[in-house]
Image (cartoon, helix red, strand yellow):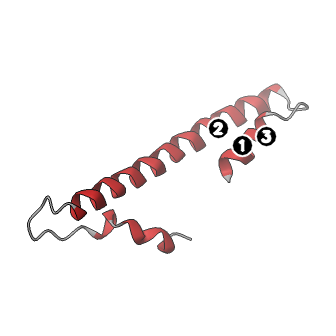
Amino acid sequence: MYLFEQLERLNEPDMKEGQKQWELERSRAVANLASQVVAAGQLALRAEKAYDRNEAINAKMPEMLEADTADKIE
């Protein structure tokens, strides 16, 4: 949701130059954070796939890599 809100703010025609700079910095921060969230999701997915293929004998997946943690984030 934040990504689309930030895009709307960047397209604001009446924005002053100083405010534009602030919004650009904010956009970079939001994009960097979104990239980290996506990377964490990709890691969890790769861990789940490896676990399902039984690549590790008697392995217990670390809780932080379990893909069902989305309900804990609110």
Give the secondary structure at mark 2: helix
Judge whether 16 appears above or below 3 on screen: above
Q: Is residue 57 left or right of residue 5?
A: left
Q: Residue furthest bottom?
A: 72
- Residue for point 81% across, 33% down: 11
Q: Are marks 3 and 2 in contact (CB under 8 Å)?
A: no
Q: Which residue is mark 2?
A: 27
Q: Is residue 48 left or right of residue 34?
A: left
Give the secondary structure at mark 1: helix
Q: Residue furthest right?
A: 14
Q: Is residue 27 left or right of residue 7?
A: left
Give the secondary structure at mark 3: helix
- Residue for point 48% across, 74% down: 72
Q: Residue furthest left?
A: 57
Mark 3 residue type: Arg
Q: Which residue is mark 3?
A: 9
How many residues crowd around disc 2 within 10 Å: few (fewer than 14), some, or many (20 or more)?
A: some
Mark 1 residue type: Gln
Kindly indicate the quadrant of the structure image that contains residue 31: top right
The dot on residue 6 is: 1
Mark 2 residue type: Ser
Residue 50 x/y as whole percent: 23, 57
The dot on residue 66 is: none
In three-dimensional space, the C-alpha distance between marks 1 and 2, rounded to whole angstroms, equals: 6 Å
Q: Are marks 3 and 1 in contact (CB under 8 Å)?
A: yes
Residue 6 x/y as whole percent: 72, 43
In three-dimensional space, the C-alpha distance between marks 3 and 2, rounded to whole angstroms, equals: 9 Å
Nearest the camera: 6 or 18? 6
Q: Earlier in the sequence, mark 1 or mark 2?
A: 1
Nearest the camera: 56 or 21? 56
In three-dimensional space, the C-alpha distance between marks 3 and 1, rounded to whole angstroms, equals: 5 Å
